Image (cartoon, helix red, strand yellow):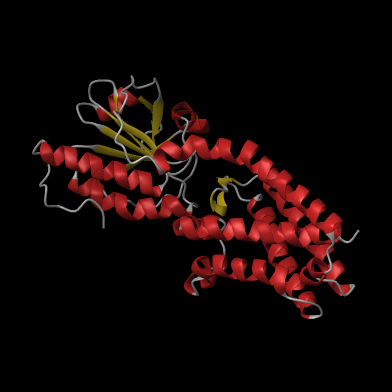
Amino acid sequence: MAAPFILPAVLLALVLIVSAVFKLREPSTTADAFASLRLPTWLRTMNGPVLLPYAELVLAVALVVIPAPAYVAVTVVVALLFVAYLVVIVRALGFAERVECGCFGRLGLGEVDRRTAVRNGLLVVLALVAVGDAVAGRSVIQRLTSFGAAEWTWLLGVAVAVFLTWLVVGRAGESATRATIFDDEPRDYQRQPIPYGALVDRATGEPRELAAIGGQQPLLLVFLKTSCGACARTMEILPAWAERHPVVRTVAVPPGSGIEEVPDLGAAVTWMDDPRTTLARTFGVTYPAAVLLGVDGMLAGGPETGFDDISNLLEEISEQLAEAGLVPSEQPVTE
C-alpha cells in the first residue's frame, strides 16, 4: 500500500498551514517571537515576520501539488526550514532567560523548553523522510492520483484521527481563551484582595511590601523581560503613559533579581526586583503582564498578559482617571 508514504508530507503540509493561519491571525506574535528569539535584525528589516506565514502557505501547497522531479526541491526547502526552526529553538534553550515563542502564532505562544525542541526535532525527521521519498521518484500528487478505494479509506481514517485529536486536545486550550478573544460582552470585574508580596528596591536593596510601595497612590505593576518582543513594545509605550498619569505609581518588575542592566523608562517608571519571580508566580502571570492595585487594598485591574491586553488596561485606567478629572480626557493613551 502506497498510502502511508504520503503521510509525512501531508502532516508537514498541515503543520505549515496551521502555523501560517495563526501567524496571519496574530501578526504581532510573530514579530515578538523574532525579537524574543534574538533573530538577526536584517530578518525583521526585510519583513521576515510578515513574509514567513505566506512562505509557509506556499510550501504547504507545493508539498501536495508539485510532482516529481521538482518535488525533490520542495521537500529539501521544507526540510531546511524545519532544521532552521530546530536550530533557533535549541539556541534559545541556552539563553539566560526563558523565552516565549509564538511558533504557531497565538496557538503556540508559550515558553521554549525541551518539549519544544523535541517537537521540532520530530518535524525535521518527517521532513527528511519526505526528502527520501522524493529522491526515490515519488510525490504526494502522483500517489494520490493512483489511489484506489483502500488507500483513500486509510487516508480518511488518518484524517479522522487528526481531527479527533484536535477536538480533544486543541479545543481545551481554545476554550480557556475564548472569553477574552471572542466574547465582546463586557463582564464585571471581580475585585479581590491584594495578595501579600514584596519587591526589592534596586537603590537600597531593601524589600518593600506592596502596600508600602503604592502608599496613597494606585500602584501599577508591569512585569517585563529585557529580551522579550512583546515586552519591548510595552516598554515603548509605558514611559509616556506613566508620565501623563503621575497619580498612578508605575513600577516595572523584571524576572528574579540581579539584572543590572535594565532600560531607562524615564523618571515616572521605577524598576524594582522580584526575587525568584515570587510575585509574578503569585499573580500567575507570564511576561509581559500588568496589574493595578488600588489604595483600598483590593485589585483594581488585571492581571492582564500580553501587549494588546496591557494596552487595553492602560486605556481603561486613563478613561477612569479622566472621568474622575485626574487627567485631561483629550490626552492620548498610547503613542
Who's the residue at 46% across and 35% down the image? 285
Side of 212 relative to 85 (left or right): left
Residue reaching furthest to the bottom = 69
Please count the marks in the image. 0
Estimate the x, y position of residue 65 in percent, counting from the top left.
Answer: 71, 72
- Do we see residue 111 in this rendering? yes
Residue reaching furthest to the front = 149
Who's the residue at 90% across and 72% down the image? 136
**Which image quadrant for residue 68?**
bottom right
- Which quadrant does the C terminus fall into? bottom left
Side of 89 relative to 330 (left or right): right
Estimate the x, y position of residue 75 in percent, counting from the top left.
Answer: 76, 70
State the residue in front, 168 or 115.
168
- Which quadrant does the N terminus fall into? bottom right
In the rendered view, would you say 77 is above or below 100?
below
State the residue in front, 189 or 8.
8
- Do we see residue 206 in this rendering? no
In the rendered view, would you say 76 is above or below 183?
below
Who's the residue at 44% across and 41% down the image? 254
Side of 231 relative to 59 (left or right): left
Estimate the x, y position of residue 149 in percent, counting from the top left.
Answer: 83, 57
**Which image quadrant for residue 184?**
top left
In the rendered view, would you say 122 is above or below 115?
below
Estimate the x, y position of residue 303 in percent, counting from the top left.
Answer: 38, 34
